[in-house]
Each structure stands twice: as C-alpha cells, then as structure tokens.
Image: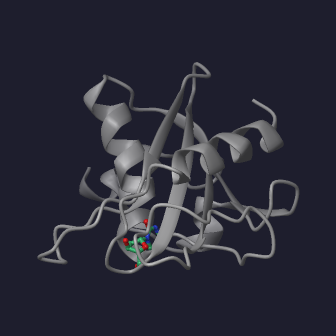
C-alpha cells in the first residue's frame, strides 16, 4: 500500500482513540504481508496501567486474527485539546509520535527489524520513515532464544 494511504488510515484509526485522561490521541495502521490493514487506537483506563497503545492494539488485533508477518505501520498522534477527549482531531500542525519502548518490543516479536517500516506522520502529507532496527538497535527478539 502507498505510504500516504496507510497514513490516512492511521488518522482514521485515531478518531476512535479513548483518551479521557491524557487527551493524547494516537492512531496506527498496520499492514500485513498480504496487504490487509489492521487499525488501532490507544485505549486508556481509569486505573492507568491497563492502558493500551495504538500500535499494540493494531498488533494484537492482527495476531489474534491469525496474522504474524507484517510490512509496515503508520503512526499518528498528538494532543486533543478538548476535555471530553473525543473531538478536535487536527490533522496538521502536530508533531511526530514515536512508538514507546514497549510497542517497539512487540514489533520485534513479529517483524524483521531490517525490513519492517515505521512511518511517523505529523500531517497527512509529512512523514518520516524508519526501519525497526533504526528505532530499536540491538533489539532482543525470538531469534535470541534459539
Ligand atoms: N501512546 C500510544 O498509543 N502510542 C505511542 O506510541 C505513545 C503513547 C498513548 C498511551 C497513552 O494513552 C497516551 O498515548 C499518552 O501516553
């Protein structure tokens, strides 16, 4: 899939973010090897620690549907200014939202660090592209247990 199309889907996923505590809404669109795309948003919790990041939501949806190999993920995120946390999803003027360390480790479990692409967008047309290896150098993964 074209980069800008995957980014558009990440913005779409972000609209479903449940963020009443941080007001920081994140969306992710994860493309599997066969081209199927799984969307994810962050889902917060009153007890805070059960919060799930957008990227892991997308991965866990995909893996639970039988998918284990992936090409790339697009990630978008930023503050949502209103207090209900359910509107004002500006698609421009934001900043990049790099994946947290826990999400990078989940990517390491299912993706080839040399080829898996991580697209970080700050608007529907402005984005950076990294490999997982660039964002998680010397990562520990399944091969280390062989
Ligand atoms: N968050 C994500 O969903 N993905 C990231 O890559 C960074 C952080 C979420 C977790 C929490 O709901 C909010 O953003 C603020 O940390």
Q: Give the residue drawn at x 47%, y 32%.
A: 69
Outermost residue on the top side: it is: 34
In the rendered structure, the answer to whether residue 20 lies left or right of residue 77 reads: left
Q: Give the residue drawn at x 52%, y 72%.
A: 136
Q: Give the residue drawn at x 60%, y 44%.
A: 12
Q: Nearer the viewer, residue 35 or 126?
A: 126
Residue 95 x, y percent position in the rendering? 71, 78
Residue 116 in view, yes or no: no
In the rendered structure, the answer to whether residue 20 lies left or right of residue 118 reads: left
Q: Quadrant of residue 18?
A: bottom left
Q: Quadrant of residue 55?
A: bottom left
Residue 27 in view, yes or no: yes
Count of labels in the image: 0
Residue 35 x, y percent position in the rendering? 62, 22
Q: Nearer the viewer, residue 139 or 65?
A: 65
Looking at the image, residue 30 lies above or below residue 120 = above
Please tell me in which quarter of the rendered image ligand 1 is found: bottom left
Q: Give the residue drawn at x 53%, y 51%.
A: 15
Q: Quadrant of residue 145?
A: bottom left
Outermost residue on the right side: it is: 125
């Amino acid at each position: 899939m074209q980069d800008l199309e995957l980014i558009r889907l990440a913005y779409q996923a972000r609209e479903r973010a449940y963020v009443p505590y941080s007001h920081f809404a994140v969306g992710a669109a994860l493309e599997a090897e066969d081209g199927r795309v799984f969307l994810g948003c962050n889902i917060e919790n009153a007890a805070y620690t059960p919060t799930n990041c957008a990227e892991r939501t997308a991965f866990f949806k995909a893996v639970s549907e039988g998918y284990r190999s992936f090409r790339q993920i697009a990630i978008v995120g930023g503050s949502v200014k209103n207090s209900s946390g359910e509107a004002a999803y500006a698609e421009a003027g934001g900043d990049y939202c790099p994946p947290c360390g826990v999400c990078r480790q989940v990517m390491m479990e299912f993706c080839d660090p040399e080829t898996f692409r991580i697209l970080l967008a700050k608007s529907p047309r402005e984005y950076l592209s990294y490999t997982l290896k660039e964002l998680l150098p010397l990562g520990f993964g399944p091969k280390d247990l062989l």
